[in-house]
């Protein structure tokens, strides 16, 4: 990771908002593509060893992206993103909800707002996520195999085991 | 349905109750006194906080004292840290992809 690139992550516990800012060493047009084209999204959006698979994506206002996060053991977690606003290359908004494999959505979901800007060849992306409920985030956590109930003690034991192995 | 912890701490009175409890365990009556609130109003807040495990009741004689559960708040912090790491991983992967694409287009 390039340590000069900005990465800010804030959770506003009282307003249920998550704010993310990240800089990328690439032109705005390319970064925009990486966030709005399925074939590119699927390559980076799932933290390894998870995989992402887009079933279909219509990137237009009112259009949807229907995709799954797949865990190493083959379990699929589907989501639907509905695009509510698009200003090419600079902004898009979408409503994100979990769904089953038949595209039936589990509401409520959350609202995501993406902003792109470039300066001196560095593109800055600002993401605001609104109304991310704890239940939703717990589900995401489950998907990434981190249980909300993982106690400090378990974590300490795990860390101790890992240091011993090294 | 389990109480949403964000909802629980979104209320300023509940945050104040939690802060008070970090200093000392209290009974509902004392809490009502300190906030100049009816016992009823306090009980509603206590219920919300208790349902998401931020406070725990303990019987002491005939009274019930509520204790602040620091471990729960710590879990929330840990889990937020994990969420941040997930995003970090994704963005590192994107860095890598962008570099690859740029290299390909300059060939």
Image: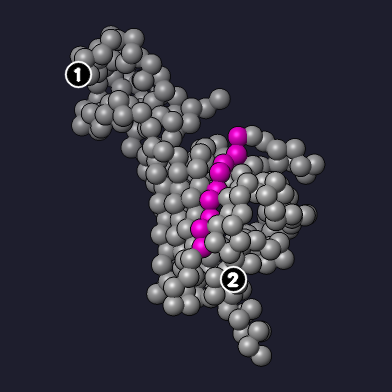
Find residue B34 and name its label.
1
Both marks 1 and 2 on one chain: no
The chosen color scheme is one colour
Q: Residues within 10 Å of mark 2 (few under 14, many from 20)?
A: some
Which is more foreground, mark 1 or mark 2? 2
Q: Nearer the viewer, residue B37 or A40?
A: A40
> In x, y percent, where is residue A152?
41, 46
Q: Which residues are magenta?
A: A108-116
Which residue is found at the position 39% from the left and 44% from the top?
A: A12
Which residue is found at the position 48% from the left and 50% from the top?
A: A128
Outermost residue to the right = A102
> In x, y percent, where is residue B30?
22, 15
Q: Residues within 10 Å of mark 1 (few under 14, many from 20)?
A: few
Q: Chain of mark 1?
A: B
Residue A51's place in the image compared with A118, above or below, is above
> In x, y percent, where is residue B45?
36, 20
Indicate the secondary structure of the residue bearing disc 2: helix
Q: Which residue is mark 2?
A: A29
Magenta stretch holds residue B92: no
């Amino acid at each position: 990771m390039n340590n000069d690139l900005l990465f800010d992550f804030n959770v506003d516990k009282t307003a249920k908002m998550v704010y993310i800012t990240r800089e990328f060493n690439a032109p705005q047009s390319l970064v925009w593509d990486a966030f709005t084209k399925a074939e590119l999204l699927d390559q980076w959006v799932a933290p390894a060893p998870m995989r992402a698979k887009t079933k279909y994506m219509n990137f237009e206002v009112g259009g949807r992206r229907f995709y799954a996060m797949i865990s190493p053991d083959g379990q699929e977690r589907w989501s639907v993103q509905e695009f509510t606003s698009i200003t090419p290359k600079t902004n898009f908004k979408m409503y994100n909800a979990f769904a089953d494999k038949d595209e039936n959505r589990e509401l409520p979901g959350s609202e995501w707002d993406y902003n792109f800007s470039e300066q001196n060849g560095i593109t800055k992306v600002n993401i605001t996520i609104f109304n991310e409920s704890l239940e939703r985030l717990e589900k995401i956590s489950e998907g990434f195999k981190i249980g909300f109930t993982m106690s400090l003690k378990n974590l300490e034991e795990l860390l101790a085991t890992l240091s011993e192995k090294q | 349905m389990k109480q949403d912890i964000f909802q629980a701490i979104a209320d300023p009175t509940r945050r104040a109750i939690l802060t008070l409890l970090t200093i000392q365990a209290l009974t509902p009556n004392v809490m009502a006194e300190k906030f100049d609130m009816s016992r009823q109003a306090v009980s509603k807040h206590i219920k919300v906080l208790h349902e998401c495990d931020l406070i725990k009741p303990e019987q002491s004689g005939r009274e019930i004292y509520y204790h602040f559960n620091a471990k729960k708040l710590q879990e929330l912090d840990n889990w937020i840290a994990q969420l941040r790491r997930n995003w970090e991983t994704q963005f590192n992967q994107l860095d890598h992809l962008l570099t690859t694409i740029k290299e390909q287009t300059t060939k």
